[in-house]
């Protein structure tokens, strides 16, 4: 089939690549000249494991093309996916301007019947708005070309995007016509044997399903983070509790890890957007508000722990804090809503300096911090180290922020000999207190046994 994807970001590029890889003729369109130029000459502008070779394979086979031309993109296909950003507005509502702008372009330029598939995460009712926008543009031209609008939210995770798309748990398709459903079934057949993953529903249900899924994931994390505080105080270990409850298939093992709060471009934004959607309909989503409140507090936890360790935030002035990991999770360079930024901002405000290392996200982090604090302040306060080892040299303590694989088994004796205060704060519970004790390191995790009882202030 001929497919166009509008938006070549974390979702659009993966969707375009995977559809091309099963034999479709795909054009991927973006407004960003630089992004399209890089993609066209064979560079992949994001860090996503295993993506680059599949992009290359399909680009060289001629099945995957990149363009900034609306006319080429819209003229190419009978099926057009919208995979543009839906960032939060000031009050947390999802901004659908990019979605509607793309819909207007389609209405202005389409010359034949089309299936318009919305993959962006959008408020309930957006499919209707897309339909009205395209219809208005067609009416403005005085033409009447049939088209359908389908809602097909995406559930891939960054860092696992290719695998998630190629082997999905479910394919949610909201459609109001049997014809549209039939085309979508055919399109997704390579990813779903006997269509067993295919779940058909109305467009509004599909739109709400996307928010419900992310809201549920966020709620599980906040539940565990809140319980972690209690576990730490009671002398229990949240890691044991996680294993204990995760063994119950009704609960399941995934998304139960306590940590420094959920971040990224979607969970925080989608929780806020769903709260706003409900508020506009007079509903106060109590559970989701609590989820968000717990998460906001959790993102400040490591700073509070550091302040308490050094006997007060004011004692952080002049301290050097090493951070391992900046991205909101491993295997991505995405820094959107990364909890590391909350910690760095607080440390800089307290007068500490930061020595940070991330295997791939340092460039993105530097851009964001320079934009916030200015080049000079950033250069004076944040060192972007080129290795994990360089980050800990001359640092007082180490904070593990993102659980990249390369941080899992460091030389603890080296850390003990290098860190001036000989302390490790583990924001992801990947280390074993006994091992660090034996190496002569002070350890704090999140909700681990003795996090409270054993807590010491820096001598
Ligand atoms: N990042 C993720 O893991 C997931 C994101 N989503 C949702 O998918 C949507 C896209 O997210 P990302 O790919 O992360 O965003 P992104 O910001 O990485 O990419 C969006 C792209 O759309 C382009 N764009 C904006 N307006 C355009 C227009 N009118 N025409 C052509 N291109 C245009 C931008 O230049 C950008 O390259 C969002 O609604 C998001 O909530 C859903 C599932 C997973
Ligand atoms: O809508 C989206 O964009 C996507 O949002 C999330 O995917 P993603 O943001 O890539 O990352 P996750 O793996 O969900 O992690 C989100 C955050 O939660 C944190 N997390 C995750 C799991 C856990 O047990 N504990 C925990 O703190 C991670 O560290 C990270 O900061 C969802 O998992 C995807 O299904 C969804 O498609």
Image (tube, grey):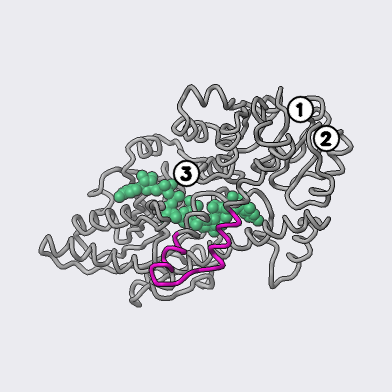
Q: CA distance from mark 1 to mark 3?
A: 46 Å
Query: Is residue 287 shown in magenta?
Result: yes
The residue sitting at 75% across, 60% down in the picture is 242
The answer to whether residue 450 is above or below residue 354 is: below
Please tell me whether mark 3 or mark 2 is closer to you in this view.
2
Q: Earlier in the sequence, mark 1 or mark 3?
A: 3
- Say if residue 128 shows up in the picture: yes
User: Magenta span: helix, strand or loop, mainly?
Assistant: helix
The answer to whether residue 364 is above or below residue 131 is: above
Residue at the far left in the pictured view: 142
Q: Contact (CB < 8 A) between labels 1 and 2?
A: yes
The answer to whether residue 53 is above or below residue 194 is: above
Q: Which residue is mark 2?
A: 441
Q: Which residue is mark 3?
A: 57
Q: Quadrant of residue 184?
A: bottom left
The residue sitting at 46% across, 44% down in the picture is 55
Q: Contact (CB < 8 A) between labels 3 and 2?
A: no
Q: Earlier in the sequence, mark 3 or mark 2?
A: 3
């Amino acid at each position: 089939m001929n497919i166009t994807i509008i938006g070549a970001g974390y979702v659009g590029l993966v969707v375009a690549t995977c559809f091309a890889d099963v034999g479709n003729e795909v054009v991927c369109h973006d407004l960003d000249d630089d992004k399209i130029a890089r993609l066209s000459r064979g560079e992949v502008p994001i860090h996503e494991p295993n993506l680059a070779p599949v992009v290359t394979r399909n680009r060289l086979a001629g099945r995957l093309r990149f363009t900034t031309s609306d006319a080429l993109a819209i003229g190419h296909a009978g099926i057009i996916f919208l995979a543009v950003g839906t960032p939060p507005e000031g009050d947390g509502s999802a901004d659908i301007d990019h979605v509607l702008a793309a819909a207007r372009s389609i209405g202005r330029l389409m010359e034949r019947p089309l299936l318009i598939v919305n993959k962006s995460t959008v408020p309930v009712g957006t499919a209707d708005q897309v339909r009205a926008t395209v219809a208005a543009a067609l009416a403005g031209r005085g033409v009447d070309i049939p088209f359908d609008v389908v809602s097909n939210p995406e559930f891939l995770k960054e860092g696992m995007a290719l695998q998630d798309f190629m082997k999905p748990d479910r394919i949610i398709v909201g459609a109001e016509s049997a014809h549209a459903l039939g085309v979508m079934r055919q399109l997704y057949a390579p990813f779903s044997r006997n269509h067993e993953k295919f779940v058909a529903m109305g467009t509004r249900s599909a739109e709400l399903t996307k928010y419900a899924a992310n809201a549920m994931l966020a709620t599980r994390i906040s539940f565990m983070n809140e319980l972690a505080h209690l576990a730490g105080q009671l002398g229990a270990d949240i890691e044991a509790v996680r294993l204990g409850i995760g063994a119950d298939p009704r609960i399941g093992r995934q998304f139960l890890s306590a940590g420094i709060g959920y971040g990224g471009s979607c969970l925080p934004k989608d929780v806020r957007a769903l709260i706003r959607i409900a508020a506009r309909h007079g509903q106060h989503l109590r559970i989701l508000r609590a989820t968000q409140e717990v998460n906001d507090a959790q993102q400040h936890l490591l700073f509070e722990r550091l302040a308490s360790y050094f006997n007060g935030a004011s004692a952080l002035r002049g301290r050097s804090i090493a951070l391992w990991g900046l991205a909101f999770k491993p295997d991505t360079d995405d820094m959107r809503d990364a909890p590391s930024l909350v910690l760095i901002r607080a440390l800089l405000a307290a007068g500490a300096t930061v020595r940070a290392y991330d295997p791939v996200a340092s460039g993105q982090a530097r851009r964001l911090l320079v934009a916030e604090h200015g080049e000079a302040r950033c250069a004076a306060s944040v060192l972007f180290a080129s290795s994990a080892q360089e980050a800990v040299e001359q640092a007082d303590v180490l904070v593990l922020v993102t659980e990249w694989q390369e941080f899992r088994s460091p030389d603890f004796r080296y850390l003990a000999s290098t860190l001036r205060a000989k302390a490790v704060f583990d924001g992801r519970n990947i280390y074993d207190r006994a091992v660090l004790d034996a190496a002569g390191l002070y350890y704090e995790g999140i909700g681990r046994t003795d996090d409270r009882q054993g807590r010491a202030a820096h001598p």
